[in-house]
Amino acid sequence: MVQKDKNPSAGEVRPGERSAKKRGRPRAFEPEAALSRALDTFRDSGFAATSLDDLSAAMGINRPSLYGAFGDKRDLFLKAYARYRAEVGEQFAKVFDPALSLRQALEGIFTTALDLYLAGENGPRGCFTVMTAGSEAMADPEIRDTVLRALASTDKALAKLFELAVSRGELPSDADVALLVQVVGSTIHTIALRARARTPRPELEAITQRTIDFVCSGATLTSPD
């Protein structure tokens, strides 16, 4: 009588073993979703303070996969920043609609900016461009050029807005467009910094409202008696 082997051979699959292996199989890698998580991580902590381990954990991939898909940390940072600029551009596009009055456009610009700068699961993150300009742009020429192009793009859009306002009579014909661009741009930068420092939104809105009133009054100040 031949006794059956109670121990299954190496080639046999025990009941439930196949389904267990399926459950443990990693999900398909989604580069766009991983890049978004990298962007969130960089926005929270900045380039220098974000480690590869932080990025690997946030993106849900190991280091070899990270390098294979995005390059080194600097390459990933530049790709994440490009994603940020694209997303921000979409958000701001509607508030530069020529059909809006100057005041409506400025109100939309600042409201959109505050919504963006005050958002973040770990607290207000401010503006990624402003944060990068004050840190990585100092030492990295490519990052610096990228930031300068972003700032120039914003200046160009604001100049077009003010030139249109002049042509429609919303601003005087001799309005200093370059000055107005600097005033609004500086306000955008200051609310970005103050937002990251957790200044309450009502205080930030008061700053933006004063800027709007100043610009829409023709950028003139009443002389003291």
Image (spheres, rainbow, N blue to C red):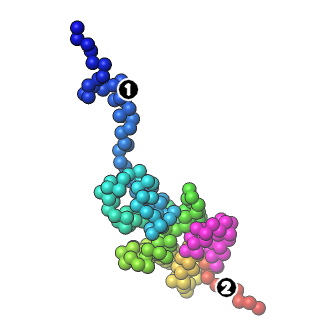
Which residues lie in the magenta part? 189-214
Q: Nearer the viewer, residue 71 or 3?
A: 3
Q: Does dot 1 land on a helix, a strand or a loop?
A: loop
Q: Does dot 2 land on a helix, a strand or a loop?
A: loop
Q: Is residue 215 left or right of residue 90?
A: right
Residue located at (30% from left, 26% from top): 13
The image shows residue 199 at horizontal and vertical percentages of 65, 68
Is the magenta region chiefly helix, strand or loop? helix
Where on the picture, by quarter, is residue 121? bottom right
* 107 in relation to 138, above or below: above
Q: Residues within 10 Å of mark 1 (few under 14, many from 20)?
A: few
Q: Which numbered mark, 1 or 2, is in the foreground of this view?
A: 1
Residue located at (50% from left, 73% from top): 130
Where on the picture, by quarter, is residue 173? bottom right
Q: Is residue 195 left or right of residue 29?
A: right
Residue located at (58% from left, 75% from top): 190
* Upstream in sequence: badge 1 or badge 2: 1
Instruction: Read off the residue under disc 1.
Output: 16
Residue located at (44% from left, 68% from top): 47
Where on the picture, by quarter, is residue 194? bottom right
Image quadrant containing the N terminus: top left
The kind of residue tagged 2 is: Leu
Cα distance in 3D space between marks 1 and 2: 79 Å
The image shows residue 44 at horizontal and vertical percentages of 51, 63
The kind of residue tagged 1 is: Gly
